Image (spheres, helix red, strand yellow):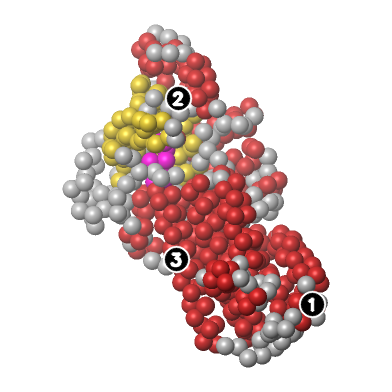
Amino acid sequence: MTTTIDRERTAPTAAPAFLSDTWYLTGRKLHALVRQPYVLAFSVVQPAIWLFLFGALFHKVIDIPGFGYHGSYLAYLVPGIVAMNAMSGNMWAGMTMIEEIDRGTLNRFLVTPASRLAIMNATVVEQAVSTTVQTLIIVALGYAGGARYPGGAVGILVLIVASILIGVFWGALSNMTGMLLRSREAIIGVYTFFMLPLMFLSSAFIQPAFMPGWMQAIASRNPLNWEVQIGRDALSATPDWSAIAVRSGGLLALALIAVAISVTTFRSYAKNV
Amino acid sequence: MQSDTPARSHPALAQPLAVPARPRPAIEARGLVKTYSAPGKKPRIRALDGLDLTVEPGTIFALVGPNGAGKSTTVKILTTLAVADEGTATVEGIDVRTDPAQARRVIGVVGQRSGADPTATGRENLVLQGHLYGQRSSAAGLRADELLERFRLDDAAGRFVRTYSGGMQRRLDVALGLMHSPKVLFLDEPTTGLDPEARTAMWEEITRLAESDQMTVLLTTHYLDEADRLASRLAIVDRGRVVAEGEPVRLKQDLGVTSLDEVYLHHAGRKYSDATRVTEAAGR
């Protein structure tokens, strides 16, 4: 029963298959993305509304003594909205998974010699690409609205990497939920259960110093908050690189664990469709 | 049975060079058992209850029976999508449990549901399928064009699959299963949901696969007449076991009856129409 997938790949002709399979399967997903760019654009609409509504509604909070942020409130919001988008966008990954199971596409791939890991990889790479595009759109929208990023290109790059990590984390959890429960409702449930609490238990909208103690305690352990703080730090004039490194390490570890769990789930799914 | 074969040496390669007295079966299953746990039901559901099967190469073999009889579970086990709790199964002499990767290279599978990507064109679907079998782009392209022509899809090759009719989609599904020229083709309910015209066309195509391509075809169907028309041999599956097996003509002759419905009644102990109705009701 412990026959692993790796043993199945020992056929001589299959040696480079893992990489080429990832390439072709990712190509399929990106192709679909390019053909329906409006899907990507639409998904940014909601975060963009948050960005401008909150930016306008609370623009004065920046003047509260002790807020301690150099820049506009809109600029303050950008990393939070990026995090929100990365989370909400990838939360739906499990829906695609269910759709491909229902349609028989996944089974069609599973009866070919294609690398099982490549099938999951394609999903992760696609999530990374779409999250990058969406993050850039939000950064550009913020800029158009008057937000400035003293951290420059390097800061934006770090923000993108952090958004990919948080996106991959939620995407993997969503895929796992989809495979295990095969229910769209479950995914929506997970989404609504986590989305707003995690957003408000982070520094996305307000400095942690203004939060009650218990909220601060949760926020400091909230991965979504790590992403927000990484982004905000990196976009500032004087980034604290050691803090960025520690939090990025935390996000990377979480993303790897989530992917490992979802790959394990996938393998057990693939053994008994 | 073959478990003492060393893992490294491949059963298929270990075959002696001398021509065996009888050709090695294309598909062989012995004593397959598969149970599922169902919510709210304490004893596990026994989908397969000791199913045996032997399919000779180059023939069309049909698994017939009502929904829930165990046909699809059998196909899943034979195509490496599920592992049997008990029993052994080989395809072209390759054990599907111990060497699934090798088994996947010799089988083509057309599942019950389409599986084609609706947001890609028919040709793109085929070329990707070829890539997954390790074909280079040029070879995959040539093979895709060949199959598109053969399945009368050349005019629609560049169209998105979501614009295809049901019959066209089903033909594309079969083409996808043939991209790597498999030795054994599994067709799970190939004509379910097709209109009569598309069904007749599919029957002709399946017949051609065995006749001119020398392929072994195992198909499942819950239409008795379809199995009667198409298959050179068939197995009636009922409650996870094969209750009758043989050439359709012989099965009827042996009992002195004229239809497979009567054959089913004799072996399964109930009318086929009743069995179908029961499973449909249970499925709701």
Residue B167 position, x and y percent, is 63, 37
Q: Residue under circle 2?
A: B65
With respect to residue A239, does A136 lie above or below? Answer: above
Q: Which chain does the residue under circle 1 lie in? A: A
Q: Secondary structure at mark 2?
A: loop
- Whole-angstrom CA distance, mark 3 to mark 2, is 45 Å
Magenta-tinted stretch:
B73-81
Q: Secondary structure at mark 1?
A: helix
Q: Residue under circle 1?
A: A60
Q: Residues within 10 Å of mark 2 (few under 14, many from 20)?
A: many
- Whole-angstrom CA distance, mark 1 to mark 3, is 40 Å
Picture quadrant of residue B138: bottom right
Same chain, marks 3 and 2? Answer: no
Picture residue at 80% right of the left edge, 70% below the top: A57
Q: Residues within 10 Å of mark 1 (few under 14, many from 20)?
A: few
Q: Which chain does the residue under circle 2 lie in? A: B
Residue A18 position, x and y percent, is 44, 65
Q: Are marks 1 and 3 in contact (CB under 8 Å)?
A: no
